């Protein structure tokens, strides 16, 4: 019999960690809504003792995510930022991180305002410039932190080259795979050592749960599981269950997200009010060729700049109807946001600042003609 791990992606998404429940045969992993587990004898237990340390619903999600990322193990957290926090806690004072200069604003805020306070050092560089990366690496550099496609400018980074460079310097490559998901790209296949996720996004997929995960080798996962228990930023069983339910349909959702985003990006590129479209699937995107080799398809995120500056951008964002004006991404419904004022406000005034005429779309899986009609109406809205 083939083992679940030998199957194709969508089979693994539905089956790994998700055997029918042995006492009843329930085909869906139950929500083990319990804080503790009765033990048959002092010092003996059935695999679970206390729900911060471990919970079977969370275990199912962790096994499934590890299989999808092709890693030994996954460790889940209460949010993407809690997952990232655990990775940074693997470091010691004086250790140095080289980070992409356009990472998610919350990632930058965490390292810059939280972890530097206990002695972690960070340098932000354009990770598409390998000479600049090499120059930024030092003897205490332990992590090279990449996000590809990046948020919100959808830059594509060369994971294989970055992994080589990190390893030459005795550092590890961390890839934030939130935008691509393991369906479109498996960073460890390119040499990355650690993959982080905000499972809030495509993995959960329905904008109804916040969570995070780190997928990595067995030793590192053991250290992270220690932190998961010792620090305690764990997802509740219902959150793990919702995320696992979302993961089952990741492949079919991503196919539709990618098709819709490609159609929207092509349409925006021809619109007279749009000055620039950032979508790696467009042939003129600087990372297009690399994305074509590194990713299965180009993703569901698309950013664009509008003529008329910040006021025009705000007007468009406030006049779509199907695209809800909201932070976050990766759900079945389409979202629009103004990164400069919303998700990336914490990097205003720094090197990571984003253009103020930029809008970011999380293109959902609705009928694409409706989405294009919605954008057409909003782009045509005149100043009142
Ligand atoms: C690329 C990326 N990484 C990490 C995070 C943080 O995840 P969470 O909001 O689940 O803490 C986000 C959130 O927007 C993100 O977009």
Image: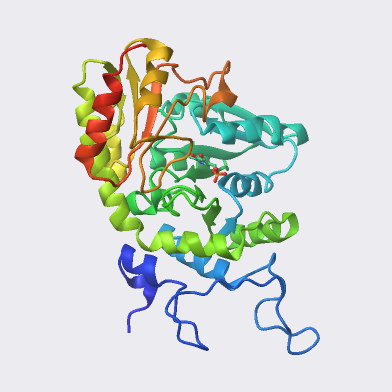
On screen, residue 66 versus residue 157, left or right, reads right
| Image x and y of residue 294, in percent | 31, 44
> Which residue is at a point 70% across and 36% down the rendered structure image?
115
Split into 4 quadrants, where in the image is the N terminus?
Answer: bottom left
Is 50 displayed left or right of 271 in the figure?
Answer: right
287 or 104: nearer the viewer: 104
Residue 122 to residue 239: above or below: above
> Is residue 184 or residue 316 the one in the foreground?
316
* Residue 58 sits above or below residue 220 on the image: below
Vertical comparison of 217 with 80: above or below: below
Q: Percent position (x, y) of residue 340?
A: 49, 22
Way the structure is coloured: rainbow
Quadrant where the C terminus lies? Answer: top left
Q: Is 196 in front, or is 324?
A: 324
255 displayed left or right of 71 = left
Snapshot quadrant of residue 333: top left
Tell me the residue at 34%/72% (across/down).
6
Q: Nearer the viewer, residue 132 or 102?
A: 102
Residue 85 percent across, percent down from the top left: 65, 45
Q: How many marks?
A: 0
Q: Quadrant of residue 309?
A: top left
Residue 296 seen anywhere in this rendered image of the structure:
no
Percent of width and height locating residue 290: 29, 36
Name the residue at the front extreme: 384
Against 69, residue 5 (above or below) is: below
Picture residue at 29% right of the left edge, 33% below the top: 280
Quarter of the view holding residue 152: top left
Can residue 84 be seen at all in this image of the molecule? yes
């Amino acid at each position: 019999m083939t083992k679940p791990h030998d199957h194709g992606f969508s089979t693994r998404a539905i089956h790994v960690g998700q055997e029918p429940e042995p006492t009843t045969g329930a085909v869906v992993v139950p929500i083990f809504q319990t804080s503790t587990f009765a033990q048959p004898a002092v010092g003996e237990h059935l695999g679970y003792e206390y729900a911060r340390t471990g919970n079977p619903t969370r275990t199912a999600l962790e096994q499934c995510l590890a299989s999808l990322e092709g890693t030994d193990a996954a460790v889940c957290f209460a949010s993407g930022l809690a997952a990232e926090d655990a990775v940074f806690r693997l470091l010691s004072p004086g250790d140095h991180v080289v980070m992409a200069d356009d990472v998610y604003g919350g990632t930058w805020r965490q390292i810059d305002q939280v972890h530097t306070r206990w002695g972690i050092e960070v340098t932000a560089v354009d990770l598409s410039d390998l000479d600049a990366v090499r120059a930024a690496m030092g003897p205490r550099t332990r992590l090279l932190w990449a996000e590809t496609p990046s948020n919100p400018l959808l830059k594509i980074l060369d994971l294989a080259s970055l992994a080589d460079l990190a390893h030459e310097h005795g550092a590890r490559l961390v890839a934030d795979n939130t935008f691509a998901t393991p369906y479109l790209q498996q960073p460890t296949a390119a040499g990355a050592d650690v993959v982080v996720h905000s499972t809030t996004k495509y993995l959960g997929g329905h904008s109804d749960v916040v969570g995070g995960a780190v997928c990595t080798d067995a030793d590192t996962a053991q250290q992270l599981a220690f932190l998961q228990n010792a620090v305690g930023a764990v997802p509740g069983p219902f959150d793990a269950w919702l995320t696992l339910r979302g993961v089952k349909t990741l492949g079919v959702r991503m196919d539709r997200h990618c098709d819709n985003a490609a159609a929207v990006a092509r349409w925006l590129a021809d619109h007279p009010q749009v000055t620039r479209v950032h979508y790696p699937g467009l042939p003129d995107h600087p990372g297009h060729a690399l994305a074509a080799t590194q990713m299965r398809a180009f993703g569901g995120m698309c950013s664009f700049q509008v003529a008329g500056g910040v006021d025009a951008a705000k007007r468009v964002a406030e006049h779509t109807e199907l695209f809800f004006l909201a932070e976050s991404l990766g759900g079945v419904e389409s979202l629009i946001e103004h990164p400069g004022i919303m998700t990336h406000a914490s990097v205003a005034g720094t090197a990571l600042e984003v253009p103020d005429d930029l809008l970011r779309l999380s293109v959902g899986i609705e009928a694409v003609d409706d989405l294009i009609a919605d954008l057409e109406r909003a782009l045509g809205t005149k100043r009142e």
